Image: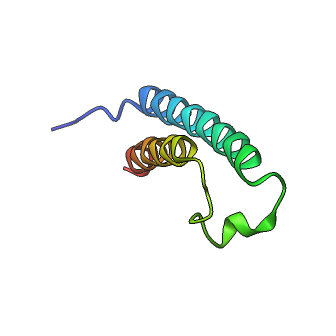
Amino acid sequence: MMYRRFGYLQSRVALDKQEQLRIFEKELQELDDDLYDGRETWTQTRKHIADAELRTRRADLMNRITEAYCSYCQ
């Protein structure tokens, strides 16, 4: 038996997922810039995010990133 690999479609799907991850990466960087205002401590802890809405926005974004990244890795 012979099966098609659909190489063109695989490439297009991978490129689409990469673009989505790039957009998420930019959103996360912008959110982190707003949250931490240039402080370097953001890489060490997130417990000092006082604004509950911003904490929630960041958590939601991280969940979307995780889902997209896991899908990309498959």
Q: Residue furthest right?
A: 38
Q: Is residue 70 left or right of residue 11?
A: left
Q: Residue at x 72, y 40 (%)?
A: 30
Where is residue 24 shown, x and y percent of the image? 59, 38
- Image x and y of residue 25, in percent: 64, 43
- The residue that appears at 70% across and 49% down in the rendered structure is 35
In the rendered image, residue 3, in percent from the top left (x then y), is placed at 24, 35
Residue 10 vs residue 27, the one in the foreground: 27
Q: Residue at x 45, y 42 (%)?
A: 60
- Residue 9 at x, y percent in the picture: 43, 26
On screen, residue 68 versus residue 43, left or right, reads left
Q: How many marks?
A: 0
Q: Quadrant of the N terminus?
A: top left
Furthest residue in direction left, as rendered = 1
Q: Residue at x 59, y 63 (%)?
A: 46
Left or right, 30 with reference to 37: left
Snapshot quadrant of residue 38:
bottom right
| Left/right of residue 22 with respect to residue 57 in the rendered view | right
Q: How is the image coloured?
A: rainbow
Hey, which residue is sitting farthest bottom in the picture?
44
Quick one: 15 or 53, which is closer to the camera?
Answer: 53
Up/down of 44 relative to 58, above or below: below
